[in-house]
Amino acid sequence: MLTNYERLAARNKEYLWHPFTQMKDYNNADPLIIERGEGMKLFDVHGRAYWDGFSSVWLNVHGHNVPELNQAITDQLGRVAHSTLLGMANVPAIELAEKLVEITPKGLNKVFYSDSGATAVEIAIKMAFQYWHNQGVRGKTRFITMNQAYHGDTIGAVSVGAIPLYHEVYRPMLFPSHVIPYPCAYRHDGGEREVLEATLTSLRHLLVARADEIAALIVEPIVQGAGGIVVMPPSCLREMSALCRKHGVLFIADEVATGFGRTGAMFACDLEEVTPDLMVVGKGLTGGYLPVAATLATDEIYQAFYADYQEQKTFFHGHSYTGNPLGCAVALASLKLMEERSMVEGVRAKAAFVERKLAAIKDHPHVGDIRQKGLMIGIELVRHKATREAYDWSERIGVRTSLRARELGMLTRPLGNVMVFIPPLAANEAELDAMTDILIESIISVTEGAH
Ligand code: PMP
């Protein structure tokens, strides 16, 4: 007789193709199958509890099974689950748009909904392109992105992506983008000042030489996420945005990972008082409950699409579930909770607590770099601290450390040799304490055992 778990595991193997996963490798191990969540923990079908140490892919805000969020969805379900924004509106979509305009950087006044970070990036790219086209400016068709950038997995988003492992295979079908260096101080002997200068100089040269063929620069503000949780030096974002403005190139901020309090500000752009021309949000928008994303635009962008006839200047883009009322209702409830609980301020205090805890492994011989902004944390593991020599990928140090953390009761997903710790924003000090202890113990036991 097969157990319930064995039956599920067999069907998981038979029918599912998992994202970003080498299935042959995955199918060799017993799968973790989640059944429910409660607060900061997820429970598998055996009833075993795990801390959600990566916020279920960087998006959970208030924890799981939150009564207020459940209620918001239930209330909306009793009204309508979905209609459409084609030719009509719905109540939660209007209310959420107003709220987003209120909390995002001043000047972003229009909200265009979609359903994932990648689609919201596609929208920003198409809007930037058509913004110039609609004004009769031809030739501004290219984008600038940053080395190791990640903006999602649809073709436009991959075209402005710059992580070879994920993006290179698709190169023949992508539109070309200009890539400027990302200011990563750890991998450069000159430190922050030099990497900042290298980035700004490269951007300046590109803009001076080619601004007439460039529609926009797209950036993950302050923290580059999938590229390894890398924090920009101070002033970088502000100076890049000023350079773009000076040379007539639009500035797109992709806040999909950094938005909604993650970095200790409501948006990472707030940290340097930058208002982008287009801003992309997703992930934490619904507290991590439902797939809603949005692209926000300034009045200037919006006006370039405003005309008398449908055939003229219209933005012909939309998804069937655009402005989904269930998603918008839960997003509103999540933002209300964030305000009532002063969560953004809370993130700063919690970040300081985690930083103090992680100081315990700062000098560990295999901890190369601890990078942190708010509750977005990456710990780069290295073979030799002094030389910064990387572990070989074949050693799977990140994967093994994550598996050890899972044995100790916490879920996380590494980025190569970088351990990622992105707990739900609502985690309290005791919960963060327990999670950080597991992170530290798994790093120590795997890296010391590796030699
Ligand atoms: N942009 C950034 C900066 C991201 O980190 C991600 C997802 N990790 C995306 C876009 C894509 O979002 P989604 O997975 O919702 O398509």
Image: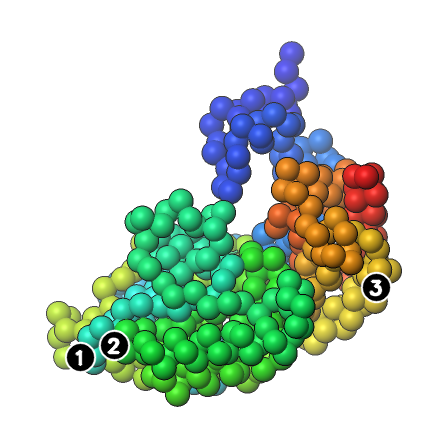
Q: Is residue 34 left or right of residue 83?
A: right
Mark 1 highlights which residue?
136
- Give the percent coordinates (x, y) of residue 154: 38, 52
Quadrant in the rendering for residue 186: bottom right
Contact, CB < 8 Å: mark 3 with mark 1? no
Residue 391, horizontal then vertical, whole percent: 69, 46
- Which amino acid does the dot numbered 3 rest on? Ala
Say what secondary structure mark 3 lies in: helix
Is any atom of residue 425 visible in this view? no
In the image shown, does 61 or 334 lie closer to the viewer?
61
Taking 310 as reference, is 14 left or right?
right
- Based on the displayed image, in which of its 4 quarters is residue 388 positioned? bottom right
Q: Mark 2 — residue?
A: 132
Residue 33 to residue 190: above or below: above
Disc 2 crowd rating (10 Å Cα; few below 14, some 14-19, many 20+) is many
Callout 2, which amino acid?
Answer: Trp
Q: State which tag comes first along the sequence, 3 or 2.
A: 2
The percent position of residue 357, horizontal first and vertical second, equals: 84, 62
Q: State the SS at label 2.
A: helix
Instruction: Report the residue at 35% width, 68% height from top.
Output: 143
The answer to the question of whether label 3 and label 2 lie on touching residues, with beta carbons closer than 8 A, is no
Determine which residue is flagged by label 3.
359
Q: Residue at x 84, y 60 (%)?
A: 363
Q: Nearer the viewer, residue 409 or 239?
A: 239
Q: Position of residue 330 (x, y in %)?
A: 52, 61
Mark 3 nearby-residue class (10 Å; few <14, some 14–19, many ≥20): few
Q: Nearer the viewer, residue 203 or 130?
A: 203
The C terminus is located in which quarter?
Answer: top right
Residue at the spot 73% in from the left edge and 62% down from the top edge: 370
Q: Is mark 2 within 8 Å of ligand 1?
A: no
Q: Earlier in the sequence, mark 3 or mark 1?
A: 1
